[in-house]
Image (cartoon, rainbow, N blue to C red):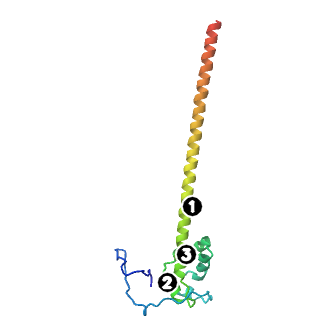
Amino acid sequence: MMGFTLPDVNVPVVKTTNCLLAADITEFPDPPPEQACIRCGFCAEACPAQLLPQQLLWFAKAQEFEKAELFNLADCIECGACAYVCPSSIPLVQYYRYAKGEIRHLKADQSKSDNARVRFEARQARLDKEQAEKEARRKARADAAAAQQKAKADESGS
């Protein structure tokens, strides 16, 4: 079953809500504590997206998000089948959601950094162009003044 456990019964139902399960604690007891992965492979067999949940778990735990992306973490549909069949009671989907969120944050930060760099380079180019134009105007005025001085000197000397 996909979805989130709501912390309170007063949480509103909105138009994006597609299902609501109202079960008591006997139908959905608290999960047993998480244990170490025993590498049974049940999660890989249960995955409808043909992913390697075990590998994705290790990458998420080690915060090796680039490797998780190479193993197609984005293709995970978060169905929960892998966590359901896990004999070690590992909440795999929560690890995947965490890793996806971190990847999203890293990409947003990289995008902001790239945009800031582009803006800085554009500003530097604009300032350099303005400085070159100022120098050209200054030189043109100096040349005009020198030509005027030379013309006055020629008139005085003639």
Badge 3 or badge 2: first in the primary sequence: 3
Q: Quadrant of the C terminus?
A: top right
Residue at image coords 61%, 18%:
147
- Choose mark 3 or mark 2, whichever is in front: 2
Quadrant holding the N terminus: bottom left
Question: What is the three-letter code of the residue carrying label 1?
Answer: Gln
94 on left or right of 155: left
Residue 33 position by quadrant: bottom right
| For marks 2 and 1 on the same chain, the one whose residue lies earlier in the sequence | 2
- Above or below residue 66? Residue 110 is above
Residue 120 screen position, x and y as percent: 57, 49
Which residue position holds label 2? 80
Which quadrant would residue 34 be assigned to in this image? bottom right
User: Of helix, strand and loop, which one carries label 3?
Assistant: helix
Q: Is residue 31 above or below residue 76?
A: below
Q: Which residue is mark 3?
A: 73
